[in-house]
């Protein structure tokens, strides 16, 4: 018997859920980046808008029902 047959099978995320998780991770990275460029209002605005877009679309993709 091989070791692979004894290991429990992990549930594979579909493409939308995987992309949703990646977008939420991108939100965390971008939101921490705003502290580095906090002296530049234009950069904070662009990064914040991009981070919020990533968060909203990430949560949407994560909880969207498959049709």
Image (cartoon, grey):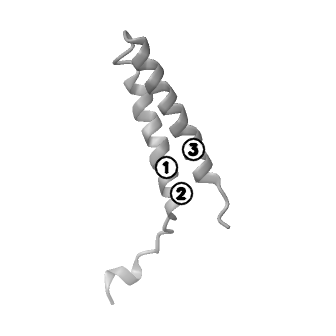
Q: Dividing the image into 4 quarters, which one contains the N terminus? A: bottom left
Discs 3, 2 touching: Cβ within 8 Å? no
* Residue 61 located left or right of residue 7: right
- Tell me, for residue 21, which label it has, or none: 1
Marked residue nearer the N-terminal end (3 or 2):
2
Badge 1 local density, few (<14 within 10 Å), some, or many (20+)?
some
Badge 3 local density, few (<14 within 10 Å), some, or many (20+)?
some
Q: Position of residue 66 (x, y in %)?
A: 65, 65
- Tell me, for residue 48, which label it has, or none: none
Q: SS at mark 1?
A: helix
* Residue 34 located left or right of residue 21: left
Q: SS at mark 3?
A: helix
**Cα distance between the residues tagged 1 and 2:** 6 Å
The residue to which callout 3 is attached is: 57
- Tell me, for residue 17, which label it has, or none: 2
Q: Which residue is at a point 49% across and 62% down the rendered structure image?
A: 15
* Residue 32 located left or right of residue 65: left
Q: Is residue 62 above or below residue 31?
A: below
Q: Position of residue 17 (x, y in %)?
A: 53, 57
Between disc 3 and disc 2, the foreground one is 3
Q: Position of residue 63 (x, y in %)?
A: 64, 53
Q: Is residue 26 above or below residue 21?
A: above
Q: Position of residue 11 (x, y in %)?
A: 51, 68
Marked residue nearer the N-terminal end (1 or 3):
1
């Amino acid at each position: 018997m091989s070791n692979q047959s004894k290991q429990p099978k992990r549930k594979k995320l579909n493409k939308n859920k995987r992309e949703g998780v990646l977008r939420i991770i991108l939100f965390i990275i971008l939101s921490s980046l705003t502290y580095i460029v906090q002296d530049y209002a234009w950069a904070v605005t662009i990064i914040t808008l991009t981070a919020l877009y990533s968060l909203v679309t990430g949560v949407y993709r994560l909880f969207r029902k498959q049709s």
